[in-house]
Image: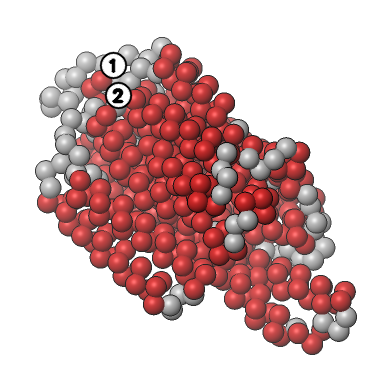
Amino acid sequence: MSKTDALPAVQPDPRRWKALIFIGLAQLMVVLDATIVNIALPSAQKDLGITDGNRQWVITAYALAFGGLLLFGGRVADLWGRKRTFIVGLTGFALASALGGAAANTAMLLGARALQGVFGALLAPAALSLLAVMFTEAKERAKAFGIYGAIAGGGGAIGLILGGLLTEYMNWRWTFFVNIPFAVVAAVGAVMVIREPAEGRNRNRLDVPGVLLVTTGLVALVYGFTRAESDGWSSGMTIGLFVAAALLLAAFVLVESKVKAPLLPLRVVLDRNRGGVYLSLGLAVIGMFGLFLFLTYYLQIVLDYSPVLTGVAFLPMVAGMITGSTQIGARLMTRVPARYLMAPGFLLASVGMLILTQIDLDTSYPALILPGLVLMGLGMGTAFMPAMSLATHGVQPRDAGVASAMVNTSQQVGGAIGTALLNTIAASATTTWLAAHAGEATNPAAAKAVQFGGMVHGFSTAIWWSFGILALAAVLAFVLINAGRPGTGGAGEGSGEGAADANQVPVLVH
């Protein structure tokens, strides 16, 4: 018998379900913030006199700080304590939101967005790893991660609705101020009900060289895709950033293989199942960004929907995500291997995306957009839940925070790549289409029809790419992920270190 087998069983925390409410609320706030500001951006730009050149930085400042610091945030949670990191992250996010809402100029707004990203990078991995260490029984864990997955998947669309309501009926500043009550309630609740298991703490010193290399490497990568969108893929700045990112991340891997207490133990990502989750989920997020980005513009500009109506139009997808996550994913997770949920889930989402490639100048919402959104939501909801759970599959408790951070990192980097890649594809397709149809713009009405036709062609082309990317995510999930059904303990449970660690007990997520 190994010494890990001799460990006494840890009783589940009696307050775990109450804790889930506050962890879910914090996650909702972070996910909302990713889309709520997008709706308010035109109003904020006009009010503060932000130039077109600086406009993208309201989004990019957040993405750079969040994506670049997530691994650091995950390791801080492991070292410092997940509950403490969670509360500090909430408090800082609320203060940064207050600063953003009170912004008097461009610099103040951009600084507030960067600070939101910094504290979000502490908050997000702490929230997910708290679930990993608080829910120890397989069926309960499946249910908890089902709820968490639904929040993570549907929060972005809810942000579109809330952003539309606040911008249209109040003021763009409220898209920042609305975070404050979320953060206060979640922080007070966390202080009162969350009790983190002490044995899961990682007592090693922080890997400072690793922090510097991975942070600068990820920032260079995200910034490279941002510059590719504005300057083109072949510009010197874009190529230089990608080369720098590759060198910095390669150096990071080398350092992590040598140091005694690495920021990201390579065992976390080299496990076949966890690596499969990070890769397939990152790709799926690229595909999802295609939907959110282009369908939002299509509904508002081409079909002339208001911001509020645009948000409401996404509600069926939210309903599909919640249903897929809690009714399909959570019910089947303890009965079938994860890949038989993730691969079909991504495939179903790709079918929804395939339907949406057929949009035209006068597409019917009930006949085409609605079924596409419902299938997209059902598929992503079904896949998200086992993905969130499997992300900490087989990890030692001391690595739960950094394993959780990897899920968020794959999503943030995937989102940044998706925005730049799909925007570039759409813009190129639109330009080509307009050049071919320039002779049709014989009067103002025809010119407008040609302009909208080019826009829709660009959106449709990008959504075709999103369809292909989601289909690839399905294939990778099926091929790479071989974890068995939770509780079977068979050979399919994992590979390498992950399989051995799966017997360590109670704080693992399978």
Disc 1 to disc 2, how far (Cα)?
7 Å
18 over 483 or under it: above or below: above
User: Would you say 345 lies left or right of 306 here?
Assistant: left
Three-letter amino acid code at the position of disc 2: Pro
Residue at x-position 25% and y-position 65%: 247
What label does residue 506 carry, if any? 2
Q: Position of residue 76 (x, y in %)?
A: 28, 35
Q: Do callouts 1 and 2 mark residues in contact (Cβ within 8 Å)? A: yes
105 over 393 or under it: above or below: below
Residue at x-position 61% and y-position 72%: 427
371 over 183 or under it: above or below: below
Q: Secondary structure at mark 1?
A: loop
Q: Position of residue 229 (x, y in %)?
A: 51, 68
**Quarter of the N terminus within the rendering:** top left
Asked which quadrant contains residue 287, the reply is bottom right
Pick whichever, 391 or 224, lies toward us: 224
Q: Position of residue 282 (x, y in %)?
A: 44, 53
User: Would you say 72 lies left or right of 188 here?
Assistant: left
Three-letter amino acid code at the position of disc 1: Val
Q: Is residue 145 visible?
A: no
What label does residue 10 carry, if any? 1
